[in-house]
Image: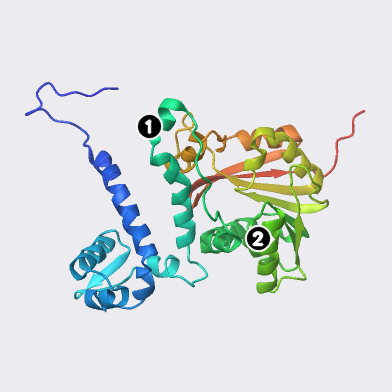
Amino acid sequence: MTEKLTDPLTGTLDFGFESLYDMILAPIKSRFLLTALELKVFDHLTKFRSSQEVVRSLGSHPRNTGLFLDGLAACDLLVKRGGKYRNSSSSQTFLVEGSPTFIGQFLVGQTRWSEPVLDDLAAFVLRGPQEVAPVPGGESGDVLANYERSGMAQQVSCIIKEMPEFLSMGSMLDLGGGPGLIGMAVVASHPSMKGVVFELPQMAKSARKYVKEYGLVDRMAVMEGDYNRDSIGQEYDLVLACASLYSSKLDLDSIVAKVYQALNLGGVFVSIHEGLTQEKTKPEKMRLGWLTAELLGKDMAFAQGEIVGSMMRAGFRSVRSRTLNTPVGPMDLDVGQKAQMSRVVT
């Protein structure tokens, strides 16, 4: 619906352009954050320090350093009190290097994926997908491990722990589980469950490191392979796929059928992925998060109900779903259960 004023000077509107202005400010906020990470500002502000002290640590310009620190405080990344600055709670938890929950590299990596498209977005719109240089480094096991233990591992393990089937589960598979911390959190919250992280060889190496680090060698195994082609094992009571089914999107039914066959009777398949709604335009975070990859020609994001439909076609007797509020945006939790016993046809 189009709204217009009969008299631009004296008429009234029931809405304003605040949201449009917010979009103009958003790149400034993100650039301040990324620059602070580049300069390691947060490492120097674990306690209150003056602007002059920060200048001495960074070897930076005095006046502009003060303005920069004020900008970070305006973004709630720093607290300013009595002319001194300190990390906010969020910055202290997630933006100080060396912390097990440091996600600075993860945030920088997400930006690098988008920049080749955003730097010349008009070309992608007018001429279609363009060749871009590969992103240097990519997402390493350590970067993903910090991301997983910065909220997702705890959230997912709590959800699974609350399931009525939880205590009866004896084995689980973390399918495409990256460094495996989400699967490890699930196993660690159970009195006796044993688990497997299934990953490509390079990431499997990282998973083995973390299994050893967390003292779960006797309860958590690591299996290497490509789940689209290779066996994923058998006789699991739980299979978890948390943001890991994208390489199977064009043939989703095949991998979901493979999961179904790998489960014991009564076993549970837990999928946690975005579920786009409103003709694939919402939720905003999930839609925008995948747009740059899709402008490069990749088919990435799942529509709401897409994974549920595949579960039902594979034979899951029931599927229950709800939306989770995660650190990276709303995601759909879809839980399919395999029937306790096969039907007998007479």
Q: Which of marks 2 and 1 is nearer the N terminus?
A: 1
Q: Which of 305 and 197 is in front in this view?
A: 197
Q: Which of 161 and 108 is in front in this view?
A: 108
| Left or right of 275 on screen, residue 249 | right
The numbered disc on residue 158 is none
The numbered disc on residue 122 is 1
Percent coordinates x, y for residue 4 in the rendering: 19, 23
Hey, which residue is sitting farthest right in the picture?
346
The quarter holding residue 169 reads: bottom right
Percent coordinates x, y for residue 37 in the rendering: 39, 63
Percent coordinates x, y for residue 265 in the rendering: 82, 47
Look at the image and tell me in which quarter the N terminus lies. Answer: top left
Q: Which of 330 and 344 is in front in this view?
A: 330
**Dot 1 lies on which element?**
helix
Front position among marks 2 and 1? 1
Label 2: how many Cα within 10 Å (few below 14, some 14–19, many 20+) = many
Q: How far apart are marks 2 and 1 (CA)?
A: 39 Å
Label 1: how many Cα within 10 Å (few below 14, some 14–19, many 20+) = few
Q: Which amino acid does label 1 sit on?
A: Ala
Count the labels in the image: 2
Labelled pair 2, 1 in contact (Cβ < 8 Å):
no
Q: Residue at x 63, y 47 (%)?
A: 244
**Dot 2 lies on which element?**
loop
The quarter holding residue 57 reads: bottom left
Look at the image and tell me in which quarter the C terminus lies. Answer: top right
Question: Looking at the picture, does residue 72 appear above or below residue 228?
Answer: below
Q: Which amino acid does label 2 sit on?
A: Gly
Q: Mark 2 points at which residue?
A: 180
Q: Residue at x 40, y 70 (%)?
A: 92
Question: Looking at the picture, does residue 146 appear above or below residue 329?
Answer: below
